[in-house]
């Protein structure tokens, strides 16, 4: 299910956003200004991609939403985050997980000494709906990630990168979330595994109605699998739009997909363009 | 008495005292597992716990008007000591651990050194520094039954202490392996941030772990205190735990038991069989030499978790 090509960001927002980020400003260590007023929204049941180069502020945005920022001496100094209509920017990560939003961190972060199954079960730590329901979720996760079922007894530290990424996503799913925040799910994985993971993301989105906000450097894969995209640069949103339109946009092609319509332009042009662009933004 | 019988007697004595070492080591393992930090203050906690119990026992008759030999008094003192350890755990989480979230383990380790001095000072400041006796009501006398049947001298107190230690250790091992909170504890030990991201409340987990470590400190403090008197030297029981940890592995509960047994048995046997050749005093250095050898051969210990690196 994809958006009609004509829908604008405003229309999408009007359709009831699951997550609404308004004018977010983040400062690390009281001095380093990382986000300079980021606004974005994730409509219910959609996949939204957050694109940008290294250090653009993608991870920081996700951590600011999930509340993990505070553990890294980062602070939200302006703006607001609303999830399901509640202000959530003062909540702890645990409280947010209970509300239904879970972050899968960059670099997977599985519990290396726990088995795959124990890893998955930790994801259900916040749930209070009983053993039977948790077991049902576990069966569901194994259904989507059959590879994990084969490896359920091995320590996560000894499984492959792709399996660890699956384990991390599966662990987050165990909390029964409505929104998953995925940080660089493709990092360090073979293209084939990346495709496998994104295919599962799509299926989860369609069948379980989980919404996704995913930060990716691999813009091509991300836009192919998302409904909607935002491009971050230096802590600001410089472009936003329907994924298919973004993917067709000349600037995005130029800077993020490495495809120029008319051959490679010189770097001077790009620099000039970027400078101009920043003024406009 | 035959040679073999003598050997068995020494071995049994060693194994029983080994379980006591295991008990102290257990306190370290718990905190190492959950916070990834070697808790230098564990010895001070043992001292603090034992001193609080004895101190309460002294002061309670005056506070409550109970007779000095009342059984109620013992339970009340135990309860108060337990409460003190719980409060200590809460305070440590709030004042030391929380401000140091996500700092390197070195920083946390240094913080526990400071904590050790603080707790030692606090304990002596509140209760005074004089040596006190502690009576648990179990005599340090040979068991008649064992003496009659095998001819070996096995202390009743040693057996009791070993039983307590074994129960505690088994209970905790099962708790870690199979309970929901135990799993969360191990998750926190592996990766603080990931644990946060799935909604495990770090603060609660730390409070639980330090409270359990406080409880273990209280039990070891009572037993060691009953044996050697409640005095500052109790803080050094922690030093005995070090070779146990190196042998067994820092993050393994079963490792603490096996390590404790090995240290206990080997130091007593070494004292008896090697001692005469070198003029005695072997017991005090043998465990450390054993630990040194282990560091050379198998640095992660018998049951320690192998360091995992994905390249």
Image: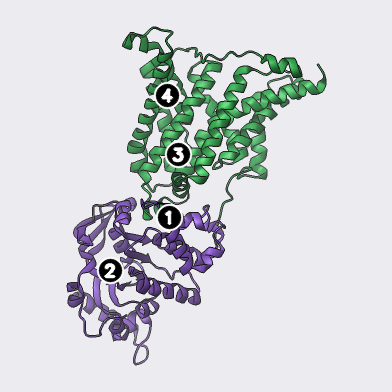
Chain colours: A purple, B green
On the image, the x and y values in percent for residue A75 come to: 26, 54
**Residue corresponding to mark 3:** B109
Give the letter of the chain under mark 3. Answer: B
Task: Tell which circle, 2 or 1, labels the residue nearer the N-terminal end.
Answer: 1
The answer to whether dots 4 and 1 both sit on one chain is no
Measured in 3D between alpha carbons, the distance from the residue under mark 2 to the one under mark 4, in whole angstroms, is 51 Å
The residue labelled by disc 2 is A234
- Residue A223 % position (x, y): 35, 79
B38 vs A264, left or right, is right
Q: Which residue is mark 1?
A: A132
Q: Is residue A69 above or below residue B24?
A: below
* Residue at mark 3 to residue at mark 2: CA–CA distance: 37 Å
- Looking at the rendered structure, whether the residues under marks 2 and 1 are on a common chain is answered as yes
Q: Quadrant of the C terminus of chain B?
A: bottom right
Residue in front for this viewpoint, A267 or B1: B1
Q: Are marks 2 and 4 in contact (CB under 8 Å)?
A: no
Q: Secondary structure at mark 2?
A: loop
């Amino acid at each position: 299910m994809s958006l009609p090509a004509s829908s604008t960001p405003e229309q999408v927002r009007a359709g009831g956003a699951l997550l609404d980020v308004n004018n977010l400003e983040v400062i690390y260590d009281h001095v380093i200004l990382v986000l300079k007023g980021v606004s974005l929204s994730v409509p219910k049941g959609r996949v939204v991609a957050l694109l940008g180069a290294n250090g653009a502020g993608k991870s920081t945005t996700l951590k600011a939403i999930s509340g993990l920022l505070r553990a890294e001496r980062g602070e939200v100094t302006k703006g607001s985050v609303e999830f399901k209509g509640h202000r959530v920017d003062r909540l702890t990560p645990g409280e947010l997980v209970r509300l239904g939003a879970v972050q899968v961190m960059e670099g997977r972060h599985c519990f290396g000494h726990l088995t795959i199954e124990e890893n998955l079960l930790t994801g259900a730590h916040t749930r209070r709906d009983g053993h039977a329901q948790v077991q049902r979720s576990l069966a569901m996760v194994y259904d989507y990630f059959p590879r994990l079922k084969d490896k359920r007894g091995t320590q996560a530290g000894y499984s492959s990168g792709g399996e660890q990424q699956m384990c991390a996503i599966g662990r987050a799913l165990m909390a029964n979330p409505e929104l998953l925040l995925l940080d660089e799910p493709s990092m360090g994985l073979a293209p084939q595994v990346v495709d496998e993971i994104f295919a599962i993301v799509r299926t989860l989105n369609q069948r379980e109605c989980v919404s996704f906000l995913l930060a990716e450097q691999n813009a091509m894969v991300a836009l192919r699998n998302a409904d909607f995209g935002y491009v971050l640069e230096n802590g600001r949103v410089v472009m936003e739009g329907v994924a298919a339109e973004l993917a067709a946009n000349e600037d995005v092609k130029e800077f993020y997909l490495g495809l120029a319509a008319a051959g490679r332009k010189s770097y001077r042009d790009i620099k000039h363009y970027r400078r101009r662009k920043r003024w406009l933004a | 008495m035959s040679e073999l019988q003598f050997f068995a007697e020494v071995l049994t004595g060693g194994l029983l005292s080994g379980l006591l070492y295991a008990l102290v080591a257990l306190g370290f393992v718990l905190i190492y597992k959950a916070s990834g930090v070697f808790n230098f203050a564990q010895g001070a906690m043992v001292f603090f716990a034992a001193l609080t119990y004895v101190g309460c026992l002294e002061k309670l008759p005056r506070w409550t008007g109970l007779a000095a030999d009342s059984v109620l008094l013992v339970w009340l003192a135990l309860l108060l000591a337990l409460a003190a350890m719980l409060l200590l755990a809460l305070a440590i989480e709030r004042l030391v651990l929380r401000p140091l979230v996500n700092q390197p383990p070195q920083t946390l380790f240094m913080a526990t050194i400071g904590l050790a001095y603080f707790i030692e000072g606090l304990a002596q400041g509140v209760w005074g520094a004089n040596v006190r006796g502690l009576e648990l009501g179990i005599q340090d006398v040979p068991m008649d039954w064992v003496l009659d049947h095998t001819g070996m001298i096995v202390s009743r107190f040693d057996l009791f202490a070993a039983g307590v230690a074994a129960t505690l250790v088994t209970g905790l091992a099962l708790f870690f392996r199979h309970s929901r909170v135990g799993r969360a504890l191990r998750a926190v030990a592996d990766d603080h941030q990931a644990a946060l991201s799935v909604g495990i409340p770090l603060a609660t987990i730390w409070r639980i772990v330090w409270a359990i470590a406080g409880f273990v400190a209280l039990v070891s403090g009572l037993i060691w205190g009953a044996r050697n008197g409640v005095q500052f030297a109790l803080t050094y029981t922690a030093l005995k735990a070090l070779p146990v940890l190196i042998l067994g592995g820092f993050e393994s509960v079963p490792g603490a038991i096996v390590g404790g047994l090995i240290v206990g048995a080997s130091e007593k046997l070494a004292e008896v069989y090697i001692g005469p050749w070198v003029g005695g005093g072997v017991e005090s250095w043998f465990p450390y030499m054993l630990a040194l050898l282990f560091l050379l051969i198998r640095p992660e210990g018998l049951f320690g978790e192998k360091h995992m690196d994905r390249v």
